Image (spheres, helix red, strand yellow):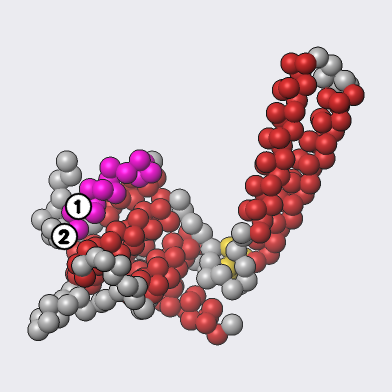
Amino acid sequence: MIDFPDWTPKLVKPILEELYDHPRTSGPRRAVLDRLLTDPRMRVVYDEFLRRDRKTGNFLNRLLSSLEGRSVEEAQLAAIREILQLVVSAAGDKIAVSKIEEIEAAKLRWHDDAKRLRLLAHDIELAAELGMLGIDDTESRVLALQDVELARRLANWLEHLTSAMRRPDDPLIAERHRGDPIVRGVQIMISVKLEETFGERFDGTAATLTSVALGAETSPRVSRSALAGKRKQ
């Protein structure tokens, strides 16, 4: 049972309870959620997401996506849940911006590691076939061939990670590090999510969510300058 502050909106409480009980919300992520639960600055964030037109009753910040059979309120709350989940994950996992040269260096390392794993798998497989390197009985051969498969799976995984790494146009790529790379990375991720959800970045809201989630100071300018720069490229 969560002891909610009195300013927590009734509509948001089930979302926060669900996040609190989720198995993935543990360790550093739990610490982030605890800050979201208790920091009074979140009141302004919830007000922004739940503001309604006094005449029509519609949400002022409406979703870009279709409702898919849900009511307007259900869709709005589902979007809020996704945003809060992203905040908890990004801040808890300390997602940081990277320089392109750092990405390229990591790609080279992983490519070399995958190549070594494949060579090692080949050597073990050959040794098992020829009965060399102490692999000269049935049990040893079975274990060796299992290791061969594992090495090749790891090589495949490294190659997949290499192909999925950030590209130059990724908003989390920075030309140079300015300020805390984790603060910048988390704030950019939140801003991108807000823009995908509502069609606007809400830089001030993204800054507040980042400040609360990380317990660090930041400003709307961080994501504004980073994402405006990406649009110019």
Quadrant where the image shows the N terminus: top left
Residue 136 appears in which quarter of the rendering?
Answer: top right
Residue for point 88% across, 21% down:
132
Q: Nearer the viewer, residue 162 or 101?
A: 162
Q: How crowded is mark 2: few (under 14 residues within 10 Å), some or many (20 or more)?
A: few
The magenta span reads 11-26
Decide: is 175 above or below 185: below
Decide: is 21 above or below 190: above
The label number, if any, that marks residue 14 in the structure image: 1
Look at the numbered disc 1 and give the secondary structure of its residue: helix
For disc 2, the marked residue is 11
The reply to whether residue 230 is visible in this rendering is yes
Magenta run includes residue 25: yes
Residue for point 51% across, 59% down:
96
| In this picture, residue 204 sits left or right of residue 130 | left
| In this picture, residue 46 sits left or right of residue 177 | left
Residue for point 82% across, 31% down:
125
Residue at the far front: name it.
69
